[in-house]
């Protein structure tokens, strides 16, 4: 039952759905295959938000920002090992993608700040609700309504390539039967390889035994299926751990909790790091504490500021104390030390200077009981390396584009360098997903 279309998209996460909608908007026939029974991939797990500069939302709220500062923050976050051309493209397109996503039904009207950003530019749904599910719901609805042929539980096995140009893909249908989807253009949007522990350890041996925050389909299929095409890979050893993951169930606590004021405390009841330092630095600092983990602590005001925290509470992840002393007792850590830590931190909030750890953003004092804590440790979170693309999202082999082959999203590498900033994945996957869809559409004509 082979079929023919203009553009085929592999993967139905944020990148794939953006590509599908963009190609459809340009008048192409589009088939999107997704191996899972549902759309969304890892994007469904994206909580923090979408970083963008000079947006209509920022302007409405009187926040001054510039694309230049966004580029600088991203390069600094990635230790200047990022592909600057891709970073510039992402930052320059960021305000436009916010408007595009809002037009497609996403809610990005609330603003916050994640680690490594010098301006409030993390766009998220009202009340600080998680960005991923909101965006996936909007994009799924738009894709279906606009007539994208979405094939769920359909596994893309390989790419058809004649040595000159791609000709489509071979897929396995839900009933196990294989068929060809013939097309002039293919967009790879299969996501990262955070859930493929073999591939993780092959690239970074020290991550053996680490948990992951990723959905189980993040197995690096895009990397594996492009092997016969000899595509260029970049930064494969750059694997990010997220510093606030619950060790017992691998649930990720969004960085926005720290952004809104939470602190990290060790088993001696002491702070040990600027909580908003980059993810690699915070992860490493936690592993150096007794027990290799830490407590993320906050008060009732921080809890009220973020809907996500409500859901953590309802699911029973939080330890509570009406006073700091009670919280310390419940955690079995020294209460006098913890009280000292809170009052010292609150003093820093008052003066605006964190003389101990130089935390720049001190949004609120932690003085309104009850007080809360959740134990956190680092886990594999994002694979920053992957397929090498140019700013047109063309897949490269020996530095040259392969005709008809495009890639976008976490399957690609280079944009984040050696450290991705929170909130930069969602902008990366949507900006380059849309570009991939548009260019694949033009190529197929
Ligand atoms: P991104 O953030 O780059 O969009 P996601 O993880 O959100 O990445 O989405 C990638 C999607 O691709 C997931 O839903 C995953 O199940 C799907 N996927 C991965 N490999 C394949 C494959 N071989 N065939 C079909 N779908 C795939």
Image (spheres, grey):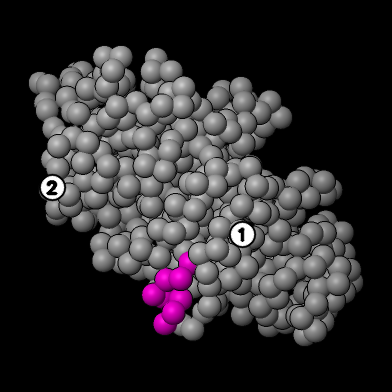
Q: Position of residue 192 (x, y in %)?
A: 47, 36
Q: Position of residue 148 (x, y in %)?
A: 16, 45
Left or right? Give the position of 264 relative to 153.
right
Left or right? Give the position of 177 relative to 388.
left
Examine the rendered structure and indicate whether residue 207 appears above or below residue 247: above
The CA span between labels 1 and 2 is 37 Å
The residue beneath circle 2 is: 27
* Residue sitting nearer the eye, 361 or 266: 361
Residue for point 49% across, 53% down: 88
Q: Which quarter of the figure has residue 119?
A: bottom right
Examine the rendered structure and indicate whether residue 234 appears above or below residue 80: above
How would you classify the magenta stretch by its main secondary structure?
Answer: helix
Left or right? Give the position of 367 relative to 196.
right
The residue beneath circle 1 is: 73
Q: What segment carries the magenta color?
A: 53-60
User: Around disc 2, counting alpha carbons within 10 Å, would you say few (fewer than 14), some (14 to 19), or many (20 or more)?
Assistant: some
Q: Which dot marks residue 8?
A: none
User: Around disc 1, counting alpha carbons within 10 Å, would you say few (fewer than 14), some (14 to 19), or many (20 or more)?
Assistant: some
């Amino acid at each position: 039952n082979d079929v023919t279309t203009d553009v085929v998209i592999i993967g139905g996460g944020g990148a794939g759905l953006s590509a599908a909608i963009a190609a459809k908007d340009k008048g192409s026939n589009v088939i999107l295959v997704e191996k899972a029974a549902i759309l969304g991939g890892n994007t469904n797990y994206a909580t923090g938000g979408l970083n963008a500069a000079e947006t209509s939302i920022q302007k409405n709220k009187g926040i001054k920002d510039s694309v230049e500062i966004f580029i600088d923050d991203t390069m600094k976050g990635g230790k200047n090992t990022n592909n600057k051309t891709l970073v510039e493209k992402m930052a320059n397109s960021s305000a436009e993608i916010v408007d595009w996503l809002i037009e497609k039904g996403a809610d990005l009207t609330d603003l916050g700040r994640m680690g490594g950003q010098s301006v409030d530019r993390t766009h998220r749904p009202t009340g600080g609700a998680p960005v991923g599910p909101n965006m996936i719901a909007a994009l799924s609805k738009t894709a279906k309504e606009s007539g994208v042929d979405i094939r769920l539980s359909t596994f893309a096995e390989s790419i058809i390539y004649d040595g000159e140009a791609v000709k489509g893909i071979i897929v396995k249908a839900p009933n196990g039967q294989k068929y060809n989807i013939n097309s002039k253009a293919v967009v790879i949007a299969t996501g990262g390889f955070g859930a493929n522990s073999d591939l993780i350890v092959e690239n970074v041996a020290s991550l053996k035994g680490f948990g992951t925050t990723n959905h189980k389909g993040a197995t690096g299929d895009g990397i594996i299926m492009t092997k016969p095409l000899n595509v260029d890979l970049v930064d494969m050893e750059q694997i990010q751990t997220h510093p606030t993951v619950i060790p017992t169930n691998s649930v990720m606590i969004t960085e926005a909790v720290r952004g809104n004021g939470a602190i990290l405390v060790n088993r001696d009841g002491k702070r040990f790091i600027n909580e908003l330092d980059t993810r690699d630095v915070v992860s490493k600092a936690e592993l150096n504490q007794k027990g290799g983990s830490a407590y993320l602590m906050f008060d009732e005001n921080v809890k009220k500021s973020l809907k996500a925290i409500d859901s953590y509470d309802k699911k029973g992840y939080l330890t509570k104390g009406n006073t700091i002393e009670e919280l310390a007792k419940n955690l079995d850590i020294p209460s006098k030390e913890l009280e000292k830590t809170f009052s010292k931190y609150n003093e820093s909030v008052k003066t605006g200077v964190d003389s101990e750890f130089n935390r720049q953003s001190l949004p609120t004092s932690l003085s309104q009981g009850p007080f809360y804590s959740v134990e956190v440790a680092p886990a594999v979170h994002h694979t920053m390396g992957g397929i090498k693309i140019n700013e047109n999202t063309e897949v490269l082999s020996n530095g040259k584009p392969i005709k008809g082959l495009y890639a976008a999203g976490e399957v690609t590498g280079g944009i984040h360098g050696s450290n991705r900033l929170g909130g930069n994945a969602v902008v990366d996957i949507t900006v380059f997903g849309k570009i991939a869809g548009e260019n694949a559409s033009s190529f197929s004509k």
